Amino acid sequence: MSLDDLPSSAPERSGPEAETVVRRVGRASLPDKITRAEELRLQLADEIVRGVLPPGAALDETDIATRFKVSRTPVREALRQLAASGLVDARAHRGAVVARPSVERLTSMFEAMAELEALCAGLAAERMLPAERHRLEAVHEELRVLSYAGNPERFNEVNERFHNTIYEGSQNGYIAEITLATRARVQPFRRAQFRNLGRLAKSHAEHDRVVVAIMRGDHVGAAAAMRAHIELVRGEYELYAVSV
């Protein structure tokens, strides 16, 4: 079954059940705009993951600031975030250098990501408000169109909105915050796998199973579908990694 087989939105709760809904996550907690430091992090991460910046290459703050025409402050923050992903070794005695996370480290990050995303999806199935369900459907449809366009960068941008909508729909700001923080660490690897041939269409199909379960109000099904999606993302990144 696909999303097209379902009603456009789930029925609204009424009566006492409606009053048990947990406090909403404010949209301000899930920003769509990114900072200059995040922009730099993404650009440097792509170069590291693609092998343009090989392991052991020095990452001088002044050189990077000059290259991107920014101050050293966003550069320093970008390197700090990359170190959290395992892509930079920032030990003071040697300066920042390009690194690669160990298999064990990468596996641990993806396992945590899968469980957190599954938790958000399960809660969203139970708690997502009608307006949020409509927004999820709209973003899902936008990704369907983009899956034929062959633009992994644009697909990734909208994909983040898709996942943000689900985090928001969990109605639990603390869980959404932890999930976003973990995603920031895994993000370079999630972005890279979109370059695999046919990956955009596969990702949309995986999303479809998540959305169908959420629209049904199926907590267990939504969590399982999201967990499976993130596990497939990890597998796709591993395929990408051996190709570069």
Image: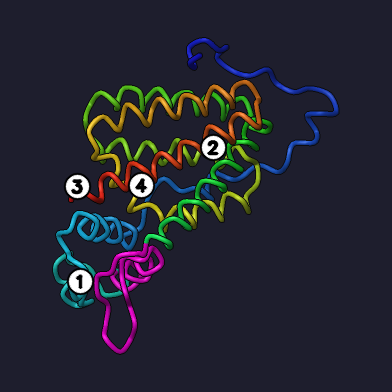
Which amino acid type is marked by label 2?
Ile
Look at the image and give the residue range highlighted in magenta: 75-102
Three-letter amino acid code at the position of disc 1: Ala
Which numbered marker is on residue 5?
none
Residue 55, x across and y down, in percent: 21, 69
Q: Residue at x 25, y 51 (%)?
A: 241
Residue receiving disc 1: 65
Q: Amino acid at mark 4?
A: Arg
Q: Is residue 35 left or right of residue 208?
A: left
Residue at the (47%, 39%) spot, across then down: 163
- Mark 1 or mark 4, which has the lower sequence index? 1
Front residue of 143/47: it is: 47
Q: Residues within 10 Å of mark 4 (few under 14, many from 20)?
A: some
User: What residue did someone put label 3 on?
Assistant: 243
Would you identify the image quadrant in which residue 223 lies?
A: top right
Looking at marks 3 and 2 on the same chain, the residue that comes earlier in the sequence is marked by 2
Judge depth for marks 1 and 2 and give the one in front: 2
Q: Is residue 211 left or right of residue 239?
A: right
Real-space Cα distance between discs 1 and 2?
35 Å
Quickly name the residue at label 2.
166
